[in-house]
Image (cartoon, rainbow, N blue to C red):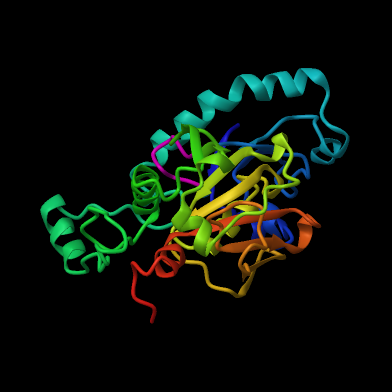
């Protein structure tokens, strides 16, 4: 019998270890007193924005949860496959009156009237030095969508034209896929944030790019296993604090790159994860980029 349950209540009742697996949205199988270690990720991001807030728990007679460690028999897995989407859709529909919708970042959805939202944003105008960079954005970036828009405006101005989009997506697990064209690097970027592409193989000239308001906003997605660190080549954000942050047993480090140290022109920071070995993510912090171009005040 499917049931809608909150993860904190489950963790207390079943003594689930407080690790990052706990917060991952998923399907699991349970009895009245224990829950399986087996799970399959369940995306709820397109179901009423109730992201990472519910588990679907299926009770079976004669099926021990711990069998999940060796996977369930084919007929059980097949049944879970058939149940997954209908149950998730029904859970989202029934939970709508009780759950406060959240965005993928975990924040509550903003329902402010559009004109009031615009007025509040215009109270913080974009203090761009038009002599250094020509941009038409009217307010200071405050969220992820601002970063996406500003990135593409900087591409249009030729400042980030080395990053050529293959696609952007609001429903795929990753935000975008880019190709890096070293021949398209502008002289202005080459002067302040040059790349070192001499030994860069073709396979490293394309990959996933994530967009976040702050660099460390990526960490919750990694902790919840919504995204894989090793799949991400670039992270485009507004700000990148050169600090370390720990969540769910994972620590993310961000450091500023020295001139010419990175393979990709325009990269301002490098991000690493303790659990990811030598895998790094190349960060383009747009505020830092504008400051190096003399287009944004340095505080």
Compared to 296, does 271 lie above or below?
above
Left or right: 293 as drawn, with respect to 126: right
- Which is nearer the eye, 100 or 30? 100
* Majority secondary structure of magenta residues: loop
Compared to 137, does 61 lie above or below?
above
Q: Is residue 132 visible?
A: yes
For residue 47: magenta?
Answer: yes
Q: Residue furthest right?
A: 70
Quarter holding the N terminus is top right
- Which is nearer the eye, 189 or 213? 189
Q: Position of residue 164 (x, y in %)?
A: 49, 36
Q: Residue furthest bottom?
A: 299
Q: Position of residue 25 (x, y in %)?
A: 59, 44
Q: Is residue 54 visible?
A: no
In the image, what residue occupies the spot 31% across and 63% down? 132
- Which is nearer the eye, 296 or 56? 296
Which range is magenta?
44-51
For residue 57: magenta?
Answer: no
In the image, what residue occupies the spot 72% across and 44% down? 200
Left or right: 188 as drawn, with respect to 249: left
């Amino acid at each position: 019998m499917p049931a809608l349950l909150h993860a904190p209540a489950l963790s207390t009742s079943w003594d689930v270890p407080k690790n990052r697996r706990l917060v991952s949205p998923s399907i699991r199988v349970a009895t009245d007193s224990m829950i399986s270690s087996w799970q399959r990720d369940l995306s709820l991001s397109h179901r009423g924005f109730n992201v990472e807030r519910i588990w679907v728990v299926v009770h079976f007679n004669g099926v021990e949860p711990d069998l999940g460690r060796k996977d369930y028999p084919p007929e059980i897995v097949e049944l879970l496959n058939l149940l997954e989407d209908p149950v998730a859709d029904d859970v989202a529909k029934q939970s709508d009156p009780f759950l406060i919708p959240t965005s993928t970042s975990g924040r509550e959805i903003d329902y402010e009237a559009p004109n009031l939202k615009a007025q509040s944003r215009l109270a913080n105008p974009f203090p761009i030095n038009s002599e250094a960079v020509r941009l038409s954005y009217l307010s200071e970036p405050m969220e992820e969508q601002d970063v996406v828009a500003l990135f593409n405006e900087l591409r249009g101005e030729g400042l980030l034209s080395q990053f050529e989009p293959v696609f952007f997506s609001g429903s795929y697990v990753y935000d975008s896929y880019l190709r890096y064209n070293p021949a398209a690097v502008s002289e202005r970027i080459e002067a302040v944030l040059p790349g070192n592409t001499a030994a860069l193989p073709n396979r490293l000239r394309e990959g996933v790019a994530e967009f976040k308001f702050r660099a460390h906003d990526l960490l919750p997605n990694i902790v919840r296993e919504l995204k894989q660190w090793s799949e991400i080549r670039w992270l485009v954000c507004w700000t990148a604090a050169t600090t370390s942050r720990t969540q769910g047993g994972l620590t993310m480090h961000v450091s500023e790159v020295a001139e010419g140290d990175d393979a990709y022109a325009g990269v301002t920071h490098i991000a690493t994860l303790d659990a990811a070995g030598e895998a790094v993510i190349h960060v383009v912090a747009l505020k830092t980029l504008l400051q190096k171009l003399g287009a944004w005040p340095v505080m």
